[in-house]
């Protein structure tokens, strides 16, 4: 039976998104191993993969330790495992692994496996800096030579990959993400009592309106736009709930104080009850400057909650109808503020419906077809 190796920079990516793939292909008789930084310490990974290989990838793409001895270790692991397919995810691990396997490993007595690369959002994008875009596009073109099939997850990246000759058309696919378990994001699973309890814990009054932003605190997510928008609404009953952690959390707290809205901005930290938070909200807010394909947007739509999102890659692919929400220009808190007011005063009246292609079962089937074609 075939052997598959899934590679990510850190084990958290495997745990959060890729365990269903390990289970699916193992149930079909495949051997499925994982390669990542910290994977051996991940209990869920050990339980779901046949084998776990640790390598100290750095998330800094310029860190020299990502090459040299790590490259040699990758070749040794792949040679010993005799994998038919190596599927790489996340930018650093994807480039380093493809660089390490760019040549046949004849001296190890094994041929190069088929390499599949899922681009979870290229580092170059419309609106990005010229020099940065040029560098990352050049790196993607280079790595594309060592790739048997490239998967993009949004239309802008699909068009860029073709136009910049990162991959020829016959070796390029557009998949709508890596899949959601629709059963987990069903509004029927959460009752009114749980929503009332959450509102009570946040000390909301009956007329208070909750907007949720579930995202890591990093510059790309632009939390400051959400806070400035809240202040610009002038509505004292509007509250912004922030779920997640990250390096900019303290800076965001200081901005809330500066804007005079600290009592209406709620920092909840990392949460495991995001579906409840979304169902408790008037809308989900995401002012990011770019996304790969926003999982929080898909989750919100699956739950029937509209999204107020920036008109950018990975969000505009999903917010495509009025019932799914509204788009506003990147970096425009005033436009977001107007959208928040409109969401309360003139709601669409129809619940958004998810695209069936977002379902994890559909994406597993698409991967099966792709792997079969490569093995043929």
Image (cartoon, rainbow, N blue to C red):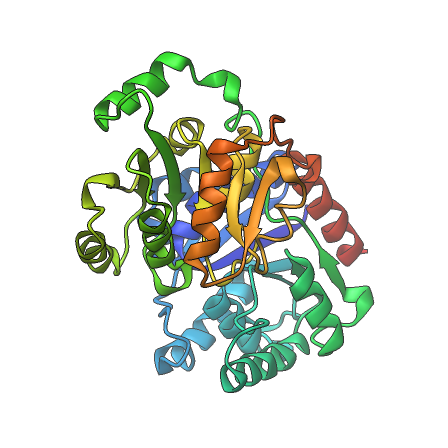
Residue 186 percent location from the top left of the image: 53, 24
Above or below, 189 relative to 56: above
Q: Would residue 83 be visible to someone looking at this image? A: no
Residue at x-position 63% and y-position 26%: 350
Residue 146 at x, y percent in the picture: 65, 75
| Horizontal side, residue 115 vs residue 304: left or right | right
Relative to 181, does residue 293 appear above or below in the rendering?
Answer: below
Question: Residue at left 46%, top 60%?
Answer: 332
Q: Nearer the viewer, residue 257 or 1?
A: 257
Residue nearer the viewer, 198 or 154? 198
Q: Quadrant of residue 130?
A: bottom right
Task: Between residue 355 and residue 105, name the one nearer to us.
Answer: 355
Q: Report if residue 224 is visible in the image.
A: yes
In x, y percent, where is residue 368? 72, 45
From the viewer's side, name the closer residue of 273 and 58. Answer: 273
- Asked whether, in this view, residue 256 is left or right of residue 152, the answer is left
Q: Residue at x 50, y 36 (%)?
A: 343
Q: Quadrant of the C terminus?
A: bottom right
**Residue appearing at x 53%, y 60% in the figure:** 329
| Residue 321 horizontal/vertical position (percent) | 67, 41
**Residue 253 position (above or below residue 141):** above
């Amino acid at each position: 039976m075939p052997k598959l190796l899934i590679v990510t920079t850190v084990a958290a990516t495997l745990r959060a998104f890729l365990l269903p793939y390990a289970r699916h292909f193992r149930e079909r008789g495949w051997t499925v191993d994982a390669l990542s930084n910290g994977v051996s310490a991940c209990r869920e990974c050990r339980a779901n993969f046949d084998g776990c290989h640790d390598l100290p990838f750095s998330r800094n793409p310029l860190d020299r330790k990502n090459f040299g001895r790590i490259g040699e270790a990758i070749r040794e692991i792949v040679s010993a495992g005799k994998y038919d397919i190596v599927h790489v995810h996340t930018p650093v691990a994807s480039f380093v692994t493809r660089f390490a396997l760019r040549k046949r490993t004849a001296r190890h007595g094994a041929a190069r496996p088929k390499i599949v690369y899922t681009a979870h959002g290229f580092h170059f994008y419309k609106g990005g800096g010229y020099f940065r875009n040029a560098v990352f596009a050049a790196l993607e073109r280079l790595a594309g030579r060592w790739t048997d099939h490239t998967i993009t997850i949004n239309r802008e990246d699909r068009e860029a990959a073709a136009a910049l000759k990162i991959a020829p058309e016959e070796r390029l696919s557009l998949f709508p993400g890596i899949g959601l378990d629709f059963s987990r994001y069903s509004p029927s699973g959460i009752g009114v009592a749980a929503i009332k309890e959450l509102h009570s814990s946040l000390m909301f009054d009956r007329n208070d309106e909750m907007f949720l932003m579930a995202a890591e605190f990093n510059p790309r997510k632009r939390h400051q736009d959400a806070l400035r928008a809240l202040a610009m609404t002038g509505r004292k009953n509007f509250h912004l709930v922030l779920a997640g952690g990250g390096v900019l959390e303290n800076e965001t707290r200081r901005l809330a104080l500066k804007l005079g809205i600290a009592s209406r901005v709620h920092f909840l930290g990392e949460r495991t009850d995001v579906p409840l938070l979304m169902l408790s909200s008037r809308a989900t807010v995401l002012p990011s400057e770019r996304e790969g394909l926003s999982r929080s947007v898909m989750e919100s739509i699956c739950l029937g909650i509209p999204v107020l999102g920036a008109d950018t890659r990975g969000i505009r692919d999903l917010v495509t109808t009025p019932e799914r929400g509204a788009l506003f220009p990147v970096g425009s808190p005033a436009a977001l503020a107007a959208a928040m007011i409109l969401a309360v005063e003139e709601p669409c009246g129809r619940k958004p419906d998810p695209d069936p292609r977002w379902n994890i079962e559909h994406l597993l089937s698409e991967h099966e077809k792709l792997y079969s074609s490569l093995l043929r």
